Amino acid sequence: MQAVQYDAYGATPDLVDIPAPDCPADGVLVEVRATGVCRSDWHAWQGHDPVSLPHVPGHEFAGVITIVGPRVTTRRVGERVTVPFVCGCGRCAYCAAGDAQVCPDQSQPGFTQPGSFADLVAVPAADLNVVPLPDDLDFVTAASLGCRFATSYRALTAHGRVRPGEWVAVHGCGGVACRR
């Protein structure tokens, strides 16, 4: 398969041919149809967030399931999907409570494993980590709803518990807060 990969921090990424990933028994392979470029990808490329080298970046993506592992019960080949930035193990108390982002055995496409700047991405614990897409949501829009949207949405709804009619002030800059 083809992938964009860099061999050293700060090095120019190259388009290369690499072996396709194996499908985890509890996971799926997703054919990438759209991928985002996040500031987190830049930090990994610069070595601020160390990754194994050579490395295939990319963690905000949407695509179609091409292979389903034998232990997956809720996903199917041909399904249009996206995946959260942090993939939980699907077995621990954190995952069971809906807090996969703090799972002690988490994985992250584009950081702890090869990412979405490739034809295919392996996604473990697919019953937990794969999110089906509505038919009317295109792949580019779905990929853009990665960590920027999910981070801000969870902050406002789960942690801030903001209700209709309340005001929110956003300070800062970057992927979640923007400046004008």
Image: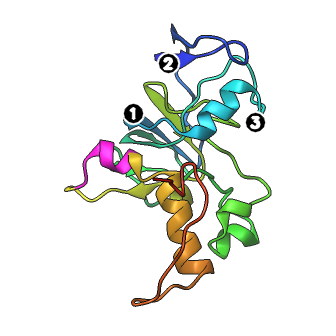
139 up-or-down from 164: above or below: above
First reached walking from the N terminus: tag 2 or tag 1: 2
Assign a secondary structure to mark 2: strand
44 up-or-down from 164: above or below: above
Residue type, numbered disc 1: Glu
Residue sitting nearer the eye, 64 or 71: 64
- In this view, the mark in front (1 or 3): 3
Question: For the stretch drawn in magenta, what is the main secondary structure?
Answer: helix
- Residue 172 at x, y = what percent? 61, 58
Q: How many marks?
A: 3
Q: Is residue 154 left or right of residue 9?
A: left
| Residue beneath the point at 56% across and 27% down | 21
Segment colored magenta: 137-143
48 up-or-down from 101: above or below: above
- Residue 26 at x, y = what percent? 58, 49
**Res. 3 mark:** 2
First reached walking from the N terminus: tag 3 or tag 2: 2
7 up-or-down from 165: above or below: above
